[in-house]
Structure formats: C-alpha cells, structure tokens
Image: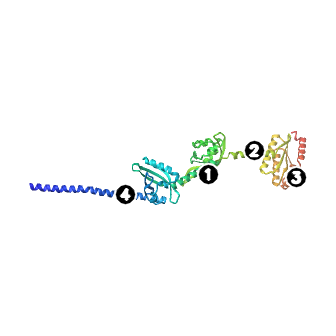
Amino acid sequence: MQSTTGKGSHAKRAHGGADVARSRARPRQDERRSRTSARAGSEERERFFSLSLDLLCVAGTDGRFKDLNPRWEQVLGYSLDELMSRPFLDFVHPDDRAPTIAAVETLGKGEAVVCFTNRYRHKDGHYILLEWSSSAVPERQVVYALARDVTEREAISAARRAAEERLQHLLLSSRVVLYAAKASNDFAPTFISNNVAGQLGYGIRELLTPGSWVERIHPEDRERFAAGRAALLEDGTHSCEYRIRHKEGNYRWIHDDSRVVRDAESNAVEVVGSWQDMTERHESEQLIRRQSAALLELSTPLIPISDEILVMPLIGVVDSRRAGQVLEMLLNGIVQRSARVAILDITGVGVVDTKVADTFMRIARAVQLVGTSFILSGIRPDVAQALASLGADLKGLTTHSTLQAAIRQAMMQGGSGVAAR
C-alpha cells in the first residue's frame, strides 16, 4: 500500500509541474501573438496610409503636420519634410486662412468638420483646392484629417454654372421661347424657358399645367393647331402660326416650330420646339395691306361723270395683279351705279406693251359682257401699235386719244338714249 501511494503522489507532482510550466508559457505565447498581430496591423495601416489616393494627415492643434501620407508630395509638389517643417497655414491661401483657423478651433472643441474647403499653394505657385473631413481628439491635441483634391471638379462645376448663367441670360434676352413636351396625344409641356413671362405674362407653372396651353389658343385657331399636332408625330416636324391669349387678355400671334425627338429604335421620346412672338409682323402686314388698298383706290379712282357714266384714270404700271384689281373695281362700280358707259383712261400708264394691251382688251370684253359700253382713252402711237400687233378683233372697241374726247362721246351717247334707260 505504501509503495502504491508513493508512486501516485510522485505522478501527481509530475503532472502538477507540467501544468505550472504550461501556465507560465501561455502569457509569453499570447504576448508573441499580440506583437505579431500589432506588427501586421501596423503594416496594413502603413500600406493603406501609403497607397491611399486621398491626402491623409495627422496634425497637432499647434498648427503643424505630425504625419502625412506620400499623396501630399504628388499633389502639392513639396517633400513631406518640407510640409512638416512649417506651420500648415503657411501653405494656405491668404484669403482662406481665417476660415481655416476657425475650422481648427471647431475641431479643438471636439466637433467634426466635414466638407470644408480651402486652397493650398503648390510648390510651383498655383493653388490646389482641397476638401476636408476632419475630427480631433482634444485631450491628445491631435487632429485626424482626410483631404481630397477637388480643383478639377470645382472647375468643371464653375464652367457648368457659367454656361447655365450664359444660357439663361441669352434666353431672357431672346425673343424665342424654348419648350419641351410629351410625345403623346395631349403634348403636355414639361419644360418652358423663363423668358415666357416677358412674352406672354404667364409664369412657368401656369403653362406647365396640362391643357393650359391649348385653353389659351384663340378659338378660331384651335382646330388648325390640333391638326398640326396630330401630323407632327407622323411628319417629325411642324411649323404653324396661331393666336394665343396674353395674361392681360389680348391675343398675340406666335410662330411655333416643333420636332419629335426619337430614340435608337425610332420611338418618339419627346417634342422640342420654340415659340416666337410674331404680333408685330402680323400688325405690319395688316398695315401694309390697308395701305395697299388705300393706294389702289388712289391709283385707280372710279369717278362718276354723271349718273350713268364712270371714268377710271390709270396711273403707273399695270401688271397682272393690278389688272385684276382694276377689273374688279370697274365691274363693281358699274353694277352699283347701273352705269351705261365706262371710260378707262390710260394716259398716265407709262409703258404699254402687247401684254398690257391684251389686258386692256380683256377688261373691255368683260365690261361689254355686263351690257355696258366701253371706251378706252389716252391712246398714244405706241399704244396703237401694241393693240394692232395683237391681231385681235377691234370691232366694237371705241378708242380716243384724249379723255376729253372720250367724255364728249359718252355724253353724246347719253343724249341719244344712254341716260334714259
């Protein structure tokens, strides 16, 4: 028994000694693993710090960089030693130093600073715009920051803003309103340029309401407008002029040019176009028409010599358009006054060629067809030659060299029964 007990105690002591050895070795193993893990973490941090395309830094609240990644050298051209040897405010644009100091003070209070921008001087003298995201550990007086070079991005944004401002200025100065609309049956507008207010008095929202544009078109023009819109999707383009109600209540003439925008599969995507106020042109055309009518009346006066004798003295050039007007006025005067004799005096017509002479013959026949005697006065030698060269039958055509002679004959005809129907 004693022998057995002794052996067991010896075995227990040996086993206990091994446990003690293992327990002493475990802290050393944990320590080695910890050091290995720390080295790996440090290597990963250094790799990330070195390879990042952003500018990473650790700075002190004393205004100096403590640690910088290599990206700083690539962006600003200075060595890391040069950057860390001076206060970072030395590199900041003078106009940006006060905002930078304010941002550092904010960080010193433990508040993060995000999307802060300032300009840093490149080694060659030009400035780089940096956008910062920073946070601080005030008790350690350390700032951790990430900066990004946004110089090109801001230049592109500035150019885009300038282009947009230029476009808006041009539109506001232009008499042409640009628009876009849905490529559907209602053609509801989706965009209208701001200068529409100067043209028609409405705000953009008032005209973007579905149906608001058509409602303002003059009732007499809506059917024509609808027909043009229906043809637009088939033809691809359309131009028309119609009247639209101004906000003040009067109507304005506009010229509407539109076309369909299609995708790669030829599906209609939208309609784009332009409106231009043509009211002044229409008013000018109406004025010209009124003036033309007044001039026509002055140049082709219809003078009643007696109740049944009319005289129309012509002055100037007679072309096909004027010949038609002369005939229309002469026939209307004959019918209205029941005239028995009509005298057309061409003394004031400068050139009478065969074409003009043929016009006079046609007027004479038309007058005779309504039962009225026709006398052509003011026959000069050149006019006689032109009439003779026509080879027309001049029987029944009474001519005189002067208007006075033509009037005397007309009065004689009146005395022999012209005046007493």
Whether residues under marks 1 and 4 lie with C-beta atoms below 8 angstroms apart, the answer is no
Q: Name the residue under label 1.
A: 237
- The disc, 3 or 4, on the residue closer to the chain's N-terminal end is 4
Q: Give the image location of residue 276, x and y in percent.
A: 65, 47
Identify the residue shown where x is 81% and y is 42%.
333
Q: Is mark 3 on a helix, strand or loop?
A: loop
Q: Residues within 10 Å of mark 3 (few under 14, many from 20)?
A: some
Q: Mark 2 points at which residue?
A: 290
Q: Distance between the residues labelled 2 and 4?
A: 94 Å
Q: How far apart are marks 1 and 4 (CA)?
A: 68 Å
- The disc, 2 or 4, on the residue closer to the chain's N-terminal end is 4
Indicate which disc residue 380 carries: 3
Q: Residue 9 versus residue 309: which sits nearer the camera?
A: 9
Q: Which amino acid does label 3 sit on?
A: Arg
Q: Residues within 10 Å of mark 1 (few under 14, many from 20)?
A: some
Indicate which disc residue 347 carries: none
Q: Residue 149 versus residue 327: which sits nearer the camera?
A: 149
- Number of disc labels: 4
